């Protein structure tokens, strides 16, 4: 009989935590998990899934408008927030039950309570001490909101999914994934939307050509104020006056702070261990996701590497297999595709042009701005953009970037090709599907001069 209650105890039943639980249990480990909020974590409850459902709802706004150019006449179209929210809530509840069922079906002991680490092998759950040979921290992140006069009136990216009514007007502060996605969504659901960002272009960290393009495209659909930040907010009779650092004011019903998320490591008992954290609170781990406390591991958003659900799933699985099957394998963060579900969508895989140049590579750059065939009849003033970054020495495609409809669906397939070593010649030798946006990736022949 083991001296420990569990072979693995997981704190957090989000994507990474549940995957680790399932794999470890299937490998014969005695597994426990503590979750104080909801099963499925951020992605299922206040992230990817409800956000994408809202994005689908917003797309119908464009589809109804576009249909007129194709002969459709649709009268009396209206949007009902209550219906969307109710149906979204029902789907999230269903997914919560599925995540709980995964744990139950794999005989994982579930504690629906907050857990704190008491020592290298002890976990305090509402005053009850359980012991574990190994501990995995997978608590994820939480929205970060700046403080200034009136910041108590801000909504965060969790709050937005629980709003009881759709505001008539909204300001969104931020320039990353969350900000541009919600600005695209709410502007189409009938909310007068203003996006402010303290930088000179949106989506910091993405390829510069993509940033230039998407900043221009998004400004066609809602107000974008760059190099701008909030100084203070005043509330008069539930009407918010937002004072900006350039001296201007905006009056609106709601203000969303979409200024990022931080690892949720406070009050976890980390001070009772040798675990180190970074300046932003992220847990420091090695390539095996092991902390400085040898029995404790961490994965997902709490380690702040790549904050994407599929990455957390892969990390959790690697930890479980390494511990209980001896299959030690390093996580491959190369060519991890991602998507931003703004309108139009943006998706990317591999290196940006600036990243490749910083790595000392000699490059060939191919890019194109394209008007979709659909919009020759819809009349919509929307363009799409594609870009390839090619390593001149090997001819390998090392970066692929796209702005356009269903970009994530398209780029996923190209990510497989790039991970298989696809070259520009391979792209050129592939017959395109006509007429599609995807075919543009295999028909580009003209190189662009490098910046600078």
Image (cartoon, rainbow, N blue to C red):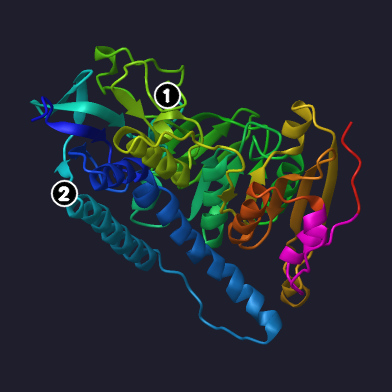
Measuring 36% from the left and 29% from the top, which residue is drawn there?
298
Q: Which residues are magenta?
A: 425-445
Q: Position of residue 303 (x, y in %)?
A: 43, 28
User: Where in the figure is residue 401, as x and y percent of width and height?
Assistant: 70, 49
Report the quarter where the N terminus lies. Answer: top left
The residue identified by callout 1 is 282
**Mark toward the viewer: 2 or 1:** 2
Where is 201 relative to 96, above or below? above
Residue 328, by quadrant, is top left
Tell which circle, 2 or 1, labels the residue nearer the N-terminal end: 2
109, above or below 65, in the image: above
Q: Secondary structure at mark 2?
A: loop
Choose top left, top right, bottom left or bottom right for residue 368: bottom right
Instruction: Judge from the rendering whether residue 118 lies leftward or rightward of residue 404; answer left or right.
Output: left
Query: Pointer 2: what residue?
Result: 107
Which image quarter is the C terminus in?
A: top right
Q: Give how far across and how far down residue 217 sits, in percent.
A: 71, 53
Among the 4 quarters of the image, the one containing residue 5: top left
Examine the rendered structure and indicate whether residue 435 appears above or below residue 189.
below
Along the line of sight, the residue nearer the viewer: 264 or 257: 264
Question: Taking the image as drawn, is residue 181 in sight?
Answer: yes
């Amino acid at each position: 009989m083991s001296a420990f209650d569990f072979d693995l105890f997981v704190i957090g039943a989000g994507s990474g935590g549940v995957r680790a639980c399932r794999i470890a249990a299937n490998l014969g480990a005695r597994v426990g998990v503590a979750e104080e909020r909801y099963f499925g974590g951020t992605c299922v409850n206040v992230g990817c899934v409800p956000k994408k459902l809202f994005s689908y709802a917003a797309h119908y706004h464009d589809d109804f408008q576009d249909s007129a150019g194709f002969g459709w006449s649709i009268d009396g179209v209206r949007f009902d927030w209550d219906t969307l929210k109710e149906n979204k809530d029902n789907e999230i509840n269903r997914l919560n039950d599925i995540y709980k069922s995964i744990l139950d079906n794999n005989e994982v002991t579930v504690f629906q309570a907050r857990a704190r680490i008491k020592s290298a092998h002890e976990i305090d759950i509402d005053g009850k001490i359980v012991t574990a040979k190994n501990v995995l921290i997978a608590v994820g992140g939480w929205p970060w909101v700046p403080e200034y006069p009136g910041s108590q009136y801000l909504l965060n990216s969790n709050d937005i999914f629980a709003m009881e009514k759709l505001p008539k007007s909204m300001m969104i502060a931020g320039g990353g994934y969350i900000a541009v996605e919600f600005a695209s969504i709410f502007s189409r659901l009938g909310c007068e939307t203003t996006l402010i960002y303290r930088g000179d272009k949106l989506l910091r960290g993405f390829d510069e050509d993509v940033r230039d393009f998407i900043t221009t495209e998004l400004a066609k659909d809602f107000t974008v104020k760059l190099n701008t930040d909030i100084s203070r907010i005043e509330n008069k009779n539930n009407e918010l006056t937002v004072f900006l650092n350039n001296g201007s004011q905006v009056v609106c019903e709601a203000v969303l702070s979409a200024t990022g998320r931080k690892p949720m490591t406070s009050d976890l008992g980390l001070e009772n261990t040798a675990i180190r954290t970074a300046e932003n609170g992220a847990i420091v781990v090695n390539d095996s996701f092991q902390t400085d406390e040898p029995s404790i591991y961490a994965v997902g958003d709490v380690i702040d590497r790549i904050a994407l659900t599929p990455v957390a799933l892969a990390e959790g699985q690697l930890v479980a297999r390494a511990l209980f099957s001896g299959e030690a394998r390093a996580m491959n963060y190369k060519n991890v595709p991602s998507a931003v579900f703004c309108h139009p969508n943006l998706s990317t895989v591999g290196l940006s042009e600036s990243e490749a140049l910083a790595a000392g590579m000699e490059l060939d750059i191919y890019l194109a701005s394209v008007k979709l065939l659909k919009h020759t009849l819809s009349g919509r003033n929307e363009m799409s953009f594609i870009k390839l970054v090619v390593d001149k020495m090997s001819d390998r495609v090392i970066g692929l970037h796209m702005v356009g409809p269903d970009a994530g669906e398209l780029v996923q397939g190209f990510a497989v090709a790039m991970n298989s070593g696809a070259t520009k010649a391979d792209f050129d030798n592939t017959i395109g599907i006509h007429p599609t946006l995807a075919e543009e990736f295999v028909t580009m022949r003209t190189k662009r001069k490098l910046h600078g």
